[in-house]
Amino acid sequence: MKDSYPFPPWIDRARPLAGAVLAVVPVYLIALLYYGGSPRTTDVGYEPVQPIPYSHAVHAGVLGIDCRYCHTNVETSAHALVPPTQTCLNCHNQIAADSPKILPIKESAASGQPIRWVRVHDLPDYVYFDHSAHVSRGVGCVSCHGRVDRMERVQQVERLSMGWCLECHRNPEPHLRPQAFITRMDWTPGADTSIGAKIRKQNNINPSTDCSTCHR
């Protein structure tokens, strides 16, 4: 009597492999979707081309122009100001005034139409972030924006995700510095490892991790 089993013998040998595949594939797909959709993958490294080839490496780095010269309100306002055309012309009416790179600035000044800079660090609309609350208490620009003074074209270097923000709120001390060095990209605490704790105590910094802090 012939065996009535309809499948070839190798099917039985393949059962353990099939079980492993069924266990591993869903985990792999979940990990792939998580990594593929994470800010580290989708946002970090974002470096849009701007309407004018403005070099932060030259202006903030070589020339040492303070961040607050252009972003004048970061210590007093929730939103960082994008500098108006006149801020550029304060220097470029005299410096490199005949450069073709300056032509769009002159056209903007003549027409009254603002330069349409492309936003790099763009949080979702449902997230509330206050620049002044951070900058005025000792969080340096470099903590969120990286070494802008080395960037020809500004790019996003941090995730800016909820988890990333919570990491800092739970342990802010490594990101705190004296107010005099708030815009200094190359500042380090040196041998004084307690400086963050001192500034935290001095400024009474106790960041909230409640949802309503950022989602209002």
Image (cartoon, rainbow, N blue to C red):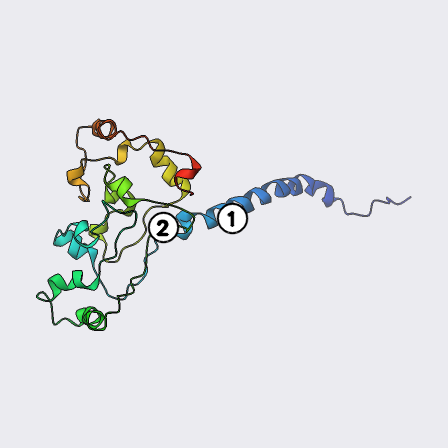
Q: Residue at coordinates 34% horizontally, 45% vertically from top-left?
A: 129
Real-space CA distance between mark 2 and mark 1, rounded to the nearest whole angstrom: 17 Å
Residue 48 at what x, y percent from top left?
A: 32, 60
Pointer 2 with pointer 1, Cβ within 8 A: no
Rendered-image quadrant of the C terminus: top left
Q: Would residue 179 appear left or right of 33 to someone viewing this image?
A: left
Image quarter (top left, top right, bottom left or bottom right) of the N terminus: top right
Front-most of residues 31 and 5 = 31
Q: Where does residue 16 sit, x and y in percent of width and height?
A: 66, 38
Name the quadrant containing residue 210.
top left
On the image, the x and y values in percent for residue 20 come to 62, 40
Q: Position of residue 178 (x, y in %)?
A: 18, 35
Pick the front one: 26 or 171: 171
Dot 2 falls on a residue whose secondary structure is loop
Report the front residue among 21 and 190.
190
Q: Which residue is mark 1?
A: 33
Q: Tell me if 112 is positioned left or right of 1 in this view.
A: left
Q: Residue at x 18, y 28 (%)?
A: 192
What amino acid type should be assigned to the residue bearing mark 2? Answer: Val
The numbered disc on residue 44 is 2
Q: Label 1 crowding class (10 Å Cα cut-off): few <14, some 14-19, many 20+?
A: few
